[in-house]
Structures are given as C-alpha cells and as structure tokens.
Image: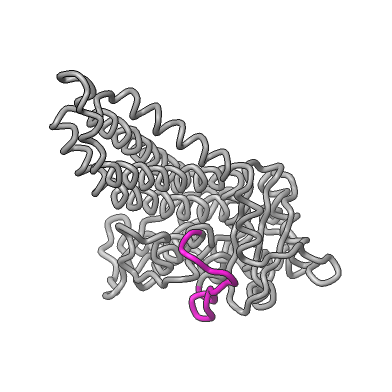
Amino acid sequence: MGGTLLIFSSSKTGVSPLSRRGKTCPGCGTTNHPGAVYCNLCQEPFAPSGISGFAGEATGNSPGPTVPGLRTVPMLSFYDASSRNVHMSRLLFLALFASFLAVGGAIGAAYGSAAYGIALALILYAILASTAYFRGSSIVLSIHGAREADPSIHQKLLNVVEEMSIASGLPMPRVFVMESPGMNAFAAGRRPSEAIVAVTTGLFEHLSREELQGVIGHEMAHIKSRDTLYNIYAAVLVGSIALLADMFLRGMPFRGRGRSGGAGRGRGNAAFFVLGILLALLAPFAAKVLQMSISRQREYHADAVGAQFTRNPLGLASALKKITQTGAQVPGENRGTQHLFLINPLRHFADNSSALLSTHPSTALRIQRLQAMAGVGAAVV
C-alpha cells in the first residue's frame, strides 16, 4: 500500500514501496531514499571514498569536485538535532524568565522594594498563565474556525494521525479541520492526553500520504515535546513584561505623591527609577526577540523529532516545498497565533530569517536540514 508507515520498513524484507526503489544499508539493513549518501539510521556512508554527496564536498584524502552556489550542511542525526535545539530553547526560556523577574524587581526597587515588585510580577503572571492554560486551545480553535474532522470525509487524515500517534507513543489527539485553500497545520493542548491537531482543507487535499505523514509527525513532535506549553508560557511572559512596563510608565506621574510621607519613607532609589524606565522601554522588545528565538528553535526541534517518527525526513521536506509554492494562509490569521503554525501564515521568511522577530526559520534552511538528515545533497539556499 502506498501509504505504509515508513517507520515499519527498516528491515531488508520490508514491504514498503521505498524498499522496492531505495538503498538498503549494508550495516543495519535500513531502507533509505534512492539518492541517499548516508544511512538515515546508523549514519554509515553509501558513497565511495572521495565524494560525500553534499554539494560535492570531498571526503577522506581525495580532493573531490566542488559545486559552486551551495551552502553545505553536515550530516545530521535525528538525536543530535533534537537535543541541540532542546538545550538552546531551554536557555532562551530561562533568559526570558530572568528578564521578566528583572523588570519586576527594577520597577519594585524604583518604588522602594524590589521584593514587592517581583511578587506583583509573579501574581500577574500566575493570573494570565492560568487563563491561557485552561482556555488556550478552545480560544485558538474558535479564532480559526476549526471544526472536528468528519470520518466520512477525512478518513485518510484520521488514519495518518493514528499512525503518527502510534509512532510517537502518544494518545490519539482530537483532529480538526480549517476551511482554507492554503496549506498549514498547528497543534495545541496543555498535555498530550488533551492534545489537538488542526490542518487546513488545502493541506489535506493536496499533499500525498508521505507528505501528510511528515506534517502530522511534525505536529506530534510539538505535542510530545510539550511545545504547546512552551508557547503558552513564553507568550504569557512576553505579555506580562509588556503589561508591567505599561503600568510603570503610566504610573510615573503619580509617583511623587507616594513620596510625600515621612522623610525618606516610600522613596525609591533614584538609580533604580532610571533603570526601571530603561527596562520598561526596552524589555518588551527584548522579550519578543527571545520569544521568537524560542519559537525558531522549537520548529527545528519538531522537524528533527517528526523525521524520527516517520524515518522519512524527505516527506516533510517535500511538503514544505509545496506549501511555499501554494501558500500557507489560514482563516482568522493574526499575529497572536502566527507562531503556532507549521509555516507562518502572515509572513514569508527569506533565507536569512534567523534573527530578531522571525517566528520561523527560513523554509529553505529547514528543507536543507531535513535533506541532510536523509543523507541527500545540500539544498540551494
């Protein structure tokens, strides 16, 4: 059957269509893409010494030919790519939380007590995070007009989601569909047992089964890695920082009234007051930059883990190519939820979209990394 789950076709006697046209690794017996240069499981090279297949990069002692115009990416294993991006996203999240505490502490110190400022910040965060935690998924579904998938119409989609839930070891999520000719998808839910996956009708209708497996594998990776919680907490931190900064700046005209009591009583340190102003002006932008950095790292991580589920990185790579050619628009698209989607529905990110306010990495670079995981030559970027 053309849609056989590729994770089950790793033996020499597998029945997947790939086994009839792909390369079989002499070391571990895994069936790979016909153009593979490395085994995507054990990383053993297929090519003879001297040519690596990555833009003509030389291997061993042979100089090998070179191909101009390609930016090479080394062979990536699923596990290395995954652990690298988990580590980076955790560091960025800690930096974001530290910025949040610094803003609260500086504002509190400006009014006389850093401890009170931090306490106020934490109370504000707890209120906003609780609302997002318990109501986030339903709000997002409502914004984008998603309806639950109908088995009589979307059976192939439901089958693929079930396959990926088995491959990932997760419970079957609820599946929703958004009416749009664009091709996109997102995952949400505070825990795997309550997760949802939503796709557009355009994506469901125009992707092949292997490409659909790649997209759903990517979304299941977000669920397994608890990225849905990362998104909630990061967004609430950014919103809390902006709200604290706004409260401080709006309250500045009234600060003098609080100082009219006893001598020195209630007086905030002047240096902290200046620091509070600077943080109130700069922290919201810095927090947004950190949030977008976290978002990019989680996208790379989900690409790697999703490819691990399907054992076919080229399925998602092919899907990303189609989406960039067709469009990623969704109903109700807005800046508040743009970071949740497989591809940003509002903006197209160029090849150098690696910094500042880009919610997603360059699609071309994502495709290149997926090809490197499959042992296929580098993409043009």
Residue 100, horizontal then vertical, whole percent: 35, 37
As for residue 328 lying within the magenta part, the answer is yes
Q: How is the image coloured?
A: one colour
Q: Is residue 29 visible?
A: no
Q: In screen coordinates, is 271 left or right of 289?
A: left
Q: In screen coordinates, is 7 left or right of 35?
A: right
As for residue 72 lying within the magenta part, the answer is no
Helix, strand or loop: magenta stretch:
loop
Identify the magenta region.
321-336
Q: Where 233 falls versus 316 (above or below)?
A: above
Residue 146, horizontal then vertical, whole percent: 68, 65
Q: Is residue 287 visible?
A: yes
The residue closer to the viewer here, 353 or 160, is 353
The residue closer to the viewer here, 166 or 332, is 332
Q: Where 142 falls versus 223 (above or below)?
A: below
Residue appearing at x 38%, y 46% in the figure: 243
Residue appearing at x 41%, y 72% in the figure: 348
Q: Quadrant of the C terminus?
A: bottom left
The residue closer to the viewer here, 367 or 76, is 367
The residue closer to the viewer here, 119 or 94, is 119
Q: In screen coordinates, is 362 left or right of 3?
A: left
Q: Quadrant of the N terminus?
A: bottom right
Residue 375, horizontal then vertical, whole percent: 47, 60
Residue 228, horizontal then vertical, whole percent: 56, 47
Residue appearing at x 24%, y 33% in the figure: 257
